[in-house]
Image (tube, rainbow, N blue to C red):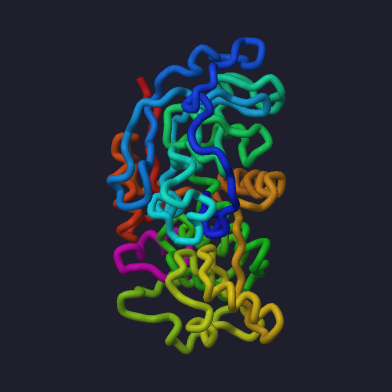
Amino acid sequence: MTVSTLSAFNAHDTSLPRSIHGEQPVGKSTVAGQHHVVGQPMSAVVASGYGPTSVLALQQVPVPTPAANQVLVQVVVASVTAADSMMRRGDPAFARLFLGVMKPKNAIPGTGLAGIVVATGAEVTRFAVGDEVFGEAGLNFGAHAQYVCVDEDGVFAKKPDSMGFEEAATLCDGPMTSMNFLRRMADVQPGQRVLINGAAGSLGTAAVQLAKHYGADVTGVCSASSAPLVLGLGADRVIDYHTRDFTADTEQYDVIYDTVGKSTFRSSRRALRAGGSYLSPVLSLGLLFWMLWTSVFGQKKAMFDATGLRPADELRVLLDDLVSLHKDGVLRCEIERVYDLSEVQTAHAHVDSGHKQGNLVMRILHKK
């Protein structure tokens, strides 16, 4: 799940896997494959409430039961994202109306994953036991566990042989969000000038590569230590945010894509060319106001979208395009660190530091 999805979260009434609430595992007649694992103990990250990383703890819970239209996936790798951190903190506060007022309704966090199908519901036709798969757990969450149930018709696909589990687990976060913003929303064209704020993060590293692929002149905003990474991904130049404020420059851009929500449309307006667009996946009341205002007045537009809440069939098209770009060598998923499931607090702390480069993942199923 992306930051933009969390910012625009809709209500959902699932909290823990069904078997945690006392339902009996279903039998062979409704679940094909390793149905015997259903209801057995598994390791999972459980959030006891909102707050610092200490609210996350590894616990033993029952393996969930897949519904008729779901697959049970043994998770090999799960991503750890800014949205996961925001959910842990209950930030922004209004999101708690949907996430759970006092504590998360969905106690097991995590959405991005790659793994192996071990059981299928009776109505599943797209996947079979043994398929290597990747995608999003969606609003059910639950990816930070050894097993998770995923809707067959969700943002989910078979993993191509050309892509490892670690890269596949991150594809629905930064790459998918950035493709939605740069291609569908901004419609970046060859020769346009694009500035990417937060160019070294999950969204930013994908955005740099995609913007260059679309033929844009790309400026990345990041720390000096991240400059080699961002330039290596194709940026034409970088701005060190410690020493230079792009909103105070005389340089202008056709598109400003603030992946981290650290700037504002108001402060960035003079850095936009006439007809330019300011985009951010981080929703705030200020951005909402300017979206409404610029939809009626002015040539410069403020834009937001909750990528993860778009129709699943639309997102699967983006996913297919991203897989093709990866196969062609146009897009690579930067993995900074790989953690163990037991190191979830450390992973979240690194996200909270604001200094991660690319993506963080947890390897849950280790090679023998």
Q: Residue at x 60, y 26 (%)?
A: 71
Residue 167 appearing in the image? no
Q: What segment carries the magenta color? A: 221-236
Percent x, y for residue 42?
Answer: 40, 24
Q: Is residue 20 magenta?
A: no
In-front residue for pair 73/200:
73
Q: Residue at x 60, y 75 (%)?
A: 302
Quadrant including the C terminus: top left
Q: Is residue 231 magenta?
A: yes
Q: Is residue 253 above or below residue 20?
A: below
In-front residue for pair 231/319:
319
Q: Residue at x 35, y 74 (%)?
A: 240
Q: Is residue 178 above or below residue 38?
A: below
In-front residue for pair 352/98:
98
In-front residue for pair 246/22:
22
Q: Quadrant of residue 361?
A: top left
Q: Quadrant of residue 355?
A: bottom left
Q: How many marks?
A: 0
Q: Is residue 293 above or below residue 91?
A: below
Percent x, y for residue 224?
Answer: 31, 68
Q: Quadrant of residue 186?
A: bottom right
Residue 287 appearing in the image? yes
Percent x, y for residue 147?
Answer: 47, 27
Q: Residue at x 50, y 42 (%)?
A: 111
Residue 138 falls left or right of residue 169:
right
Percent x, y for residue 363?
Answer: 38, 34
